Image (tube, rainbow, N blue to C red):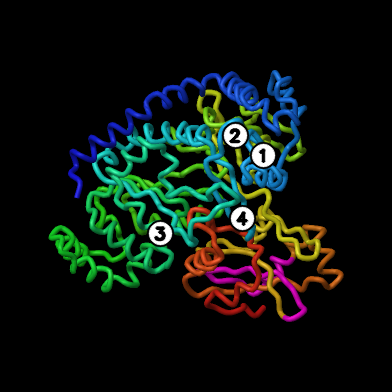
Amino acid sequence: MTSTIACRTVNTLWSLLNFRVSCNFRQACHNVKECQENYLLELLRRNSSTVYGKRNCFEHIHSIEHYQNSVPLTSYEDYIPYIDRIAQGEKSVLSCEDIKLFEPSSGSSSAEKLIPYTDSLRRDFQRGIGPWITSLYHQYPQVKQGKTYWSISPKFSTNRLHGRIPIGFDDDSSYLGFLGKWLYSQVAALGPELSTQTDDDTFKTKTLITLLAERKLGLISVWSPTFLTLLCEYFLENEEHILLSLSSSPDLHKRKRAEEISRRRSNNDFNEIWPNLGVISCWTDSSSWEPSRRLQTYFPSTTIQSKGLLATEAFVSFPYLPDHSPVLAVTSHFFEFMAQDGQCFAAHQVESGKTYSVIVTTSGGLYRYQLGDFVLVKGFIGQAPCLEFKGKSDLVSDLFGEKIHATHAAESINSVLQEYDFAMLAPDNFGTNWNYTLYVESDTFIAPDTPALLEQKLCENPNYRECIRTGQLSFAKIFRINKAAALTYTTRLSKKGMRLGDIKLSPLSKFHNWSDYFSGEYEIP
C-alpha cells in the first residue's frame, strides 16, 4: 500500500512533468489559428518527401486554405494500400518517421482498422493528456492524495503482426510515454498484468479485488460509464465470493479491508467503500448520458467528469475548466470541422451552437481523415471551441437501402420514450422477414401505441419508407428487456473482439437478432 505522502509526491511530479505542455496549451487557446496553421505546415514540411506527400504536393502548400483545396478528404479505406506497404517494410509512405505499431480500432461494425503510430503521434496525445491532468489536480486537489485507476482494456487475442509491424500497445498506459508511464505505475491501483486476462469474469474479479484493497482511491478514469456500472453490479452479485478472496489474503491490510467493506451501511453506495474518491472520468455525452446518471447513483458523493472525445486515431477534446464542455486539443493535431452542407472550417472558424463532423490531420500519417464523429460547439475557452459529442456520423444500418442513421435512430427513440436505462434500435430477422426492433430496458410504462409512433418516426426517412412499401422490411417492434441490458450488450461485443475501451452504448446497432441475447420479450401492440 502506497502512503498518502508518496501518492501526493508522485502526482505532484506528474503534474510538474506536464507543466510545459499545459502552459503551451493555455497560450494556444488565445491564438488558435496561428497554433493550428503552424502545426499543419510543419507537419507537411516534414512529410513532403513521403509517398503520400509527393502525391499531394505537400511541399507547395503554404496555408490552411491551400491545404483544404489541394488534399482530398479521406476515410480508412483510402489508407489500406499504404498500410499494406508499411507492413511489408517500406519506409516514408505516410510519415517520414518509423511506424512503431498499428493500434487496432474496432468501431460500430465488426471491421477492424489498423491505425499507424509514430513517436510524434504519441507525443501529440501527451499534449492533450498533460493539460487535462494539470487542470484535474488543480480543480480536485484531493485526487493527488490517493491512487488512481485508469481502465485497462483486457487483451482478447495474443500478440499479432501485420506484416513486419506489431499490432497494439502493451497496455493503455503506453500512451503516456516512458516517464509518464513510470510515474503512473507508482500510483496506479492496478498493474498492466490484468490486461492479459482473456476471461471476462476473471478480469472483473481480479480488478475488483485489487481496487477494493485500496481505501484511498482518488481517481477512476474509464471510457464508458457502463463499464464501471457493470463492475459495481458484478461485485453486488458476487460479493460473498469476492470478499472471501480478499479476506483470504496473507496481507493483513486486505483482510481488514474485507471486514470494513462487509460492515458498510448501504450496499449500493460505493462511496462508503472509497470515501476519498474525488473524480470519476468517463463519457457523459450522447448515448452515455443516461448510463452516467445511473453510475452517479452508485457514487453519490463523487464528481463525474465528462471525458471528452478520444479516438484511437486522435485526441480530440478534454475537460479543462469547470462549467465548460470539453475543449478542443488545439496543440495535439490539426482539426477541421465539416458542416451539414459539406463546407469545411478550421478550428478558429467554427460557430457556437452549430454541429459539425470532425476531420483530423495527425503526425501518425492521417491527412484530412474523417473521424465519423458529430460534435456540437458549446462556447469557447479563449478562441478554442468547447465540444459536446453528439454521436457517430458514419454509423448507418443499411440492409435493403433503408440507410438508418444513428442520429435518426436516437431522435426516434427519444420521440417515443421518456425515461429508460437502455435503448437501442437494431435489425431483426425472422426467416425471410426483416424488421427493426427497439430494445428497451426501463421501469416506466410503455404505451400500446409506442410501436406505431416509432414506425411513424422511422418513416420520416424516405429510404426506410420505401423499404416498408416494397415489403423488404416489416413494421418496427418493441422488445422489453427485463435485466442486465448493458452487461449483455457489452459481453456480446467483447466476444466479437471489441476492446472495452471501444464499446460505447449506441442508439443503433448493425448486428441483428439481439433478442437471442437479451432477457425479455416482445411487446404486444
Is 419 placed left or right of 82 in the picture? Answer: left
Q: Which residue is mark 4?
A: 112
According to the image, label 3 marks what residue?
196
Q: Position of residue 400 (x, y in %)?
A: 80, 65
Is tag 4's residue or tag 1's residue first in the polypeptide sequence? Answer: 4
Secondary element under disc 4, as helix, strand or loop, is: strand
Tag 1 residue: 369
- Specify the amino acid type for callout 2: Thr
Q: Secondary structure at mark 3?
A: helix
Q: Earlier in the sequence, mark 3 or mark 4?
A: 4
Which of the image's four quarters has the C terminus?
Answer: bottom right
Pick whichever of labels 3 and 2 is earlier in the sequence: 3
> Which amino acid does the dot numbered 3 rest on?
Thr
Residue 51 image position (x, y, % from top left): 70, 33
Say what amino acid the circle numbered 4 marks: Glu
* Mark 2 Cα shell of 10 Å, populated few (<14), some (14-19), many (≥20): many
Range drawn in magenta: 431-455
In whole angstroms, how far apart are the C-alphas of marks 3 and 4?
20 Å
- Residue 397: give x, y in percent of width and height: 71, 60
Rendered view: 414 above or below 485:
above
Residue sitting at 68 percent across and 50 percent down? 394
The CA distance from mark 1 to mark 2 is 9 Å
Alpha-carbon distance for marks 4 and 2? 20 Å
- Identify the residue at image location x=55%, y=19%: 31
At which x and y percent is residue 503? 53, 57
